[in-house]
Amino acid sequence: MPRLTDFQRQLSVALLDQGLRPQDVANRIGCHVTTIRWLRRRVVDTGSTRGRPRSGRPRVTNNRQDRIIHRSHIRDRFRTAVDTARQTIGTHGREVSVYTIRRRLRERGLRARVPYRGPILDEAKRERRLRWARTHRRWTLARWRSVLFSDETRICVHRPDRREHVWRRRGERFQRDCIREADRWGGASIMAWAAISFKSRTPLVMLDGNLNAQRYVDEILQREVIPFLDEHPEIQFFQQDNARPHSARLSRDFLEDNDVQVLDWPPYSPDMSPIEHLWDQLKTAISRRRPRPGNRRQLIAAAQEEWDNLPQERIQTLFNSIMRRRCSACVEAQGGQHWAHPLLSVTFYRASSLFFF
């Protein structure tokens, strides 16, 4: 059986006792499903989660140091392993290596990940997001499939260097101390607009210069949205964020005159829209092209090609798996950038052992 930490073994058994399938437990722990099946068999046969003794190189940190390493990175999620290594003297009388620190953190379920960068939310914005999520988390899947989600995005020739990492467990992407808040846009490149529905999507529209309300009505709503809605009568709602061109009286009057029902949308909530996932996938596909686009003309051509190549099944997966879960997660986060850690705030009970997380 591949080596799991005592913490991971106890957590796996607790999840199995809750009725989760071995495959689901393996996905949460981050191991192969065979490992979980062997663990379950071992617990049944021996009544213990302990692995068989193994020989190997002695550990250079003791249990107390392991706890200190873990707590230091929980208290400061952006603390580097290099800093911790410099302040930790091992049992061999020397500073431990950076790799030792990273192994100890991985044993406790922490891995370095790029932090989610969300908009700055004050209490009023959080309250509006919370009210919206409480209302819409009761929507059925069929109702979400009747929404046309739209958005603009900026695509850069050179994507920002995202070398900074955050130590977090699986499922903690949207936890407050794992988020680096920053302005949404940066750099000069091209601006694009598109909209997605469960069954189809609009073309990728390139926008030159600043987008005002008049241009939004002429180039987007009249030219793209209205014809698309006419071709897809199953769509009942049109979603757009609260950017000024969208919320201007000119835009609102145009949509009302054309009997378009606009889905109410909370402020500063890109994390609630499935099209944000698609933008990220589009930009990743562009950045992986070889050779990479070197100028604006090449970037436009690459963006159009990659958008057309995105499979519709991927969009349908976003609709099926995200919307209701996101609303519930936003409620759990009290209107903050939502996160839904499946293991926190849960008490697991097995036999005479009680585990708190």
Image (tube, rainbow, N blue to C red):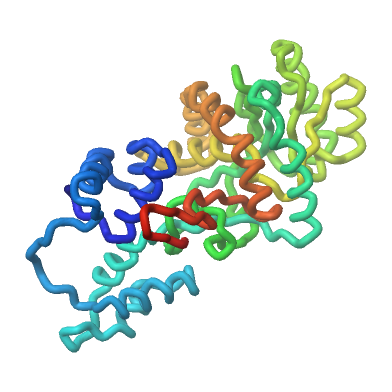
Q: Position of residue 184 (x, y in %)?
A: 63, 53
Q: Position of residue 204 (x, y in %)?
A: 60, 28
Nearer to the camera, 19 or 217: 19
Nearer to the camera, 324 or 22: 22
**Rendered residue at 58%/28% (across/down):** 319
Question: Does any portion of residue 273 appear in the rendered image?
Answer: yes
Q: Specify the quadrant of the image occupied by residue 315.
A: top right
Taking the view exactly as shown, the residue that stands out farthest to the front is: 352
Residue 346, compared with residue 97, is above or below; it is above
Q: Position of residue 313 (x, y in %)?
A: 49, 22
Question: Looking at the image, how many numbered discs can be counted on the residues?
Answer: 0
Taking the view exactly as shown, the residue that stands out farthest to the bottom is: 93
**Rendered residue at 50%/30% (across/down):** 301
Q: Is residue 240 left or right of residue 96?
A: right
Question: Does any portion of residue 165 appear in the rendered image?
Answer: no
Nearer to the camera, 30 or 95: 30
**Rendered residue at 38%/71% (across/down):** 70
Residue 91, compared with residue 226, is above or below; it is below
Q: Is residue 354 left or right of residue 195?
A: left
Q: Position of residue 294 (x, y in %)?
A: 45, 43
Residue 68, compared with residue 27, is above or below; it is below
**Rendered residue at 49%/74% (across/down):** 75
Q: Is residue 203 left or right of residue 93?
A: right
Q: Is residue 328 left or right of residue 70?
A: right
